[in-house]
Image (cartoon, coloured by chain):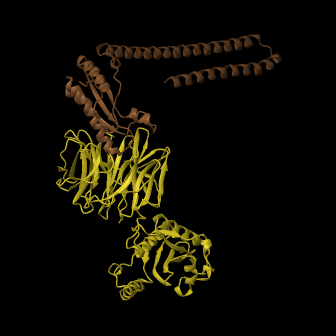
Amino acid sequence: MEKRAKMSGVFVVLCFLSLIMMAGCAEKTVVPEQPVVPNEQALKEQALKEQALKEQALKEQALKEQALKEQALKEQALKEQALKEEELKKAKEEAVTPAVSSVDIEDIHFDLDKYNLSSEARATLEKLANWMRQHKDYYVLIEGNCDERGTNEYNLALGEHRADAAKRYLMDLGVDEIRIKTVSYGEERPLDPAHNGEAWAKNRRDHFVINITKK
Amino acid sequence: MIVVHWLFEGMRIYRHISILTILCLLLPVPQAVGKVYLDIGAPTFQQIPIAITDFKELKNNRNANELSGWFSENLADCLKMTGFFNVLNKRAFLGNPEQEDLTAKSIHFDDWVAIGAEYLVKGGYLYDGTKLVAEFRLFDTVKGEPVIGTKYEGQLKDRKAMVSKFASEILYVLTGERGVFDTKIAFVLKNGPTSDIYTINFDGSQLTNLTNYKSITIAPRWSPDGRAIAYTSYKDGRPDVYIKNVAGYAARKIIGYKGLNLPGSWSPDGRKILLTLSKDGNAEIYVMDIEQGSLKRLTNNFAIDVSPVWSPDGRKIAFVSNRSGSPQIYVMDSDGNNVRRLTYEGAYNTSPSWSPKGGIIAYEGRIDGKFQIFCIDENGDNLRQLTYNSGTAESPCWSPDGRYLVYSSMAGNKGQICIMDALGKNIRVLFEDKAICMSPSWSPRFK
């Protein structure tokens, strides 16, 4: 839309320029012929006519430009309006449901080939359970992960046990089972893709994704 | 392509009969009788020394153009790939093979024996611009006689197939079983958080992607007829099992319960498939009738049970369980009864693959913090380590002839798919990439 407006603007300007040039040319050709039969009246009329034409063209040009400007302004206003409405909508949503970031649950970690919960893991899950009891509109997706060593099929089952261990602990702490989903990614979604002990320790984890319940 | 076994068919039978007769007369030892094959599975097996001369353009009886060298080089590559042949260097050839033709009487067998060649391949071809005729002959240099001869007719584009067909014939006549030249290997190529399934030919050519979901796609398993591959993909957000025709585009979801859905091996008749499902709360092994969709649960244990494979006769199933506290290989009857633990060495043994010849199960085990490939007889005897990889060697899978294993490996930061023979020798890197390579699965022979 904008592009087309610009293009037509360019076209109008070009027309105007060519008009001026034509007018200039006409003057040049007319003037040298006159001295043979001097006719001041005719010359004046000619000049007036040209003047009128010029003015007419200028006026039209100005009108068109004005229209284009108005059009652009209107569009701008509409866009701004839409943006404002969007922002309002967002703000409203946020007002109804507090931002998810208001709970900060870090990953819990596991020993090699194990799925029992450490004391740190339990503390993290207790924090999560507390938060979930206060925010009944949310559910949690627990993603069980492993390091890259060993068979990926066995690791998928191991990741599932890791996710389930966290799920059972949350249920123990009074979170409704309906609000807890699990998925195992085995060794397929490492947090750190490096092939060393540090990366492996980071990757043996449950990750928590918290989302608003779909109504 | 037309194949004509035209020359020594009768002679071959004659030869075997004559060998048997001689053996019976000279060596009345029971195990020698009736066995003329070289036992390539024996630990004492030495590679067979074989010479291959450039092929002759038959019309002019000379080595005319690049096809002469093309045939000998490609046949040499094929035989080397098996790991069973030592193809002698052409520069070691004595005399002038150019002066010999394809007949036994023109060949100076002593010259070939002198350089250590036990077998000799000679060949010729005729190409008129459209039709290609190629002849291959295998000679036993020690006995100084022809063993087999085959003539192939086709087009120029068939020449590779002609070569691998004759290589297969050589293997058959010397070892009693054809090669696996026309097989493929499916595997998983993992790039960051996404993975897809690829196939590649036994010779490393024709890398082809079977799936392209930009999701997690894993665990490829060939159907016994080689037409379809089962696998697990997260393309709908969860690990469900699909079957896809290798030649087609559409994939069919065969199972998608809550939790894990993973394919194990197909039954030998292709009607059933073993699965790992956690729909009842914990990974258990099931068997599914693919057409009817009916399921039967085979394991019932609070521990992880995963990665089931059928024995070649379909009577037993090997699988992985951590019911003893660490993942180990177990064997049970195909109805789920008679579960017994197979592996006791080491604290991590997974990924069983049952040899198509029966009797042996290959698996991956952790030793000194590294994963290596091991073999064990199905009765628990004869445990042996096959790889001593400096990185890792994982997920072994047998070739359809039971002579090779394919496995995945990490070398430095590179992923590899490697092939070795059943003794862990003659390692060949089939595919290498900066991405991680996983879960290779060997196709059956294509019909």
Write down the quadrant of residue A131 in the picture: top left
Residue B142 coordinates in the image, percent (x, y):
50, 82
Q: Depth check: give the residue in front, B377 or B311.
A: B377
Q: Depth check: give the residue in front, B290 or B376.
A: B376
Q: Which residue appears at 43% of the width and 79% of the height?
A: B4
Drawn side of residue B122 relative to residue B20, left or right: right
Q: Which quadrant does the C terminus of chain B fall into?
A: bottom left
Write down the quadrant of residue B148 in the picture: bottom left
Q: Which quadrant does the N terminus of chain B fall into?
A: bottom left
- Tell me if residue B305 comes above or below residue B384 in the rendering: above
Residue A88 coordinates in the image, percent (x, y):
36, 13
Residue B305 coordinates in the image, percent (x, y):
25, 46
Write down the quadrant of residue B58 in the picture: bottom right
- Tell me if residue B238 comes above or below residue B219 in the rendering: above
Residue B257 coordinates in the image, percent (x, y):
23, 41
Is residue B359 something that shows in the picture? yes
Drawn side of residue A81 relative to residue B258, left or right: right
Colour in which chain B is shown? yellow
Q: Depth check: give the residue in front, A186 or B272.
A: A186
Q: Which residue appears at 24% of the width and 16% of the height?
A: A134
Colour in which chain A is shown? brown
Instruction: Give the total number of marks visible in the rendering.
Output: 0
